[in-house]
Image (cartoon, grey):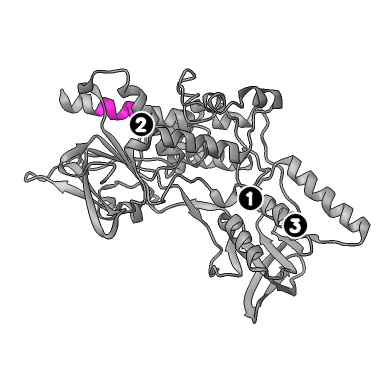
Amino acid sequence: MDTLPSGPDSIYDILGVGFGPSNLALAIAVDEHNARVPEAERLRAGFLEKQPAFGWHRGMLLDDATMQVSFLKDLVTMRDPASDFSFLCYLKERGRLVDFLNHKTLFPLRIDFHGYFEWAAARMRDVVEYSAEVVSIEPVVTDDGEVRLFDVLSRDPADPDRVIVRRTRNICVATGLEPHLPPGAALSDRVWHNSELIPRVAALTEAGVPVRRILVLGAGQSAAETADYLHRTFTGAEVCAVFAKYGYTPADDSPFANRIFDPEAVDTFFQAPAPVKQALYEYHRGTNYSVVDMDLIESLYATMYREKVQGNERLRILKVSRIRDVSFAGDRLDVTIEYLPTGEREVLATDILVHATGYRPQDLGTVLGETAKLCLRDEEDEVRIGRDYRVEVPWHVSAGIYVQGASEHTHGITSTLLSTTAVRAGEIRDSLLANRARATS
């Protein structure tokens, strides 16, 4: 039996595509609204997730990795500090609140925060269908040419060959980020993206495959964490970090720079002209992109220096370098590294190459299908999005398309981060209510 009812007579106010932290926060915001109002004023919400269970960057849930945002930027606190869906309420229920307070940190372990997300998702289990991959979103066109509804088609979890249709007045696309690879890169048993790090390492270890050298391409936080993890895991292997910089760049998490993550900063960015938007992005990309926590930088440097003293250099930094070619040679890879200042090239025999090259938002057109044709675009061919995260559409479309994570060009650097998740969820919920009130009147 489906968790979420389907059929043309079962109309939702909002159907979410994807159920990561962003749409989970929206589900909670809607649920808390519904608990305060009469039944007639409630929003009917449902969410479709292609994964079999809730999961958030599982491949990088390293035992000792910590969050890079404060626990107060959880699913609810910035919107409603009294909500019982907060990280602190989770800790209280798990019997760890006092222990966490004694830890004197704003930055929990990533595995702890993932546990919090799972706890919240379990409480919202009635509004989500897992193993339900959305295959199409189709506008429902009336006889007079208006689009007031969408049909969302997803695979039946019990029978993947069967498609289930659900009808909704609004959709909210929050399908998260997808791994980014360099041009021409192809994944294999020997070439990974770091998003698969933990299961790939586990499979390699279980199979007893000898590992003598690993290359890690990338200069950001996940790249540094990957190099550190592989160095600690494969104690007999050489781990080479390859990047075009001279060294890892520290993340700017100073108090004034962090104001770019304030909810008010979204208003500032949204209202700014395009050149100012671009300038703000360039000024503050060092708060998030291709940067590393200073503690990890110092730890990696200390490891590298200690090994140099001991005469056993297993951690190598191939600075100011790029990978120019990758070829298979039997059970290994031959990777050509170019030192950019001189153009000198070196071929390294390598067992594993890990692309820690970041993520990018999924293409909105791929997710929306035919419905993408309804989205208005600006002169740069970017989707036009309102301050309430509602995509701008032609006059004959009253059904709403909301996005979470695809609005960096309009709303700023926080669009793909956790920093404003709680506030954004409240803004989308309030927009749904306001648009329903206008339609009713």
| Residue 432 falls left or right of residue 362 | left
Q: Is residue 73 magenta?
A: no
Q: Are marks 3 and 1 in contact (CB under 8 Å)?
A: no
Q: Please state which of residues 205 and 273 is positioned toward the viewer in this rendering.
A: 205
Q: Within 10 angstroms of label 2, few (less than 14), some, or many (20 or more) residues?
A: many
Q: Going by the image, does 158 lie left or right of 76?
A: left
- The residue carrying mark 3 is 231
Residue 433 shown in magenta: yes
User: What is the magenta segment's predominant secondary structure?
Assistant: helix
Q: Are marks 2 and 1 in contact (CB under 8 Å)?
A: no
Quarter of the rendering containing residue 230: bottom right
In the rendered image, the vertical position of residue 131 relative to residue 13, given as above or below: below
Q: Is residue 441 above or below residue 362?
A: above
The residue that mark 1 highlights is 222
Q: Secondary structure at mark 1?
A: helix
Depicted 411 relative to depicted 102: above or below: below
- Circle 2 sits on which residue? 428
- Between disc 3 and disc 1, the foreground one is 3
Q: Is residue 180 left or right of residue 432?
A: right
User: Distance from label 3 to label 2 (Cα)?
Assistant: 44 Å
**Mark 3–mark 1 distance (CA, rounded to whole Å):** 14 Å
Earlier along the polypeptide chain: callout 3 or callout 1? 1
Indicate the position of residue 372 as horizontal and vertical percent values.
Answer: 29, 51
Tell me the residue at 47%/17% (across/down).
Answer: 82
Q: Give the residue type at disc 3.
A: His
Q: Earlier in the sequence, mark 3 or mark 2?
A: 3
Where is residue 411? Give x, y as percent. Answer: 45, 37
In the picture as drawn, the residue positioned furthest to the bottom comes out as: 330
**Residue stretch in magenta:** 428-435
SS at mark 2? helix
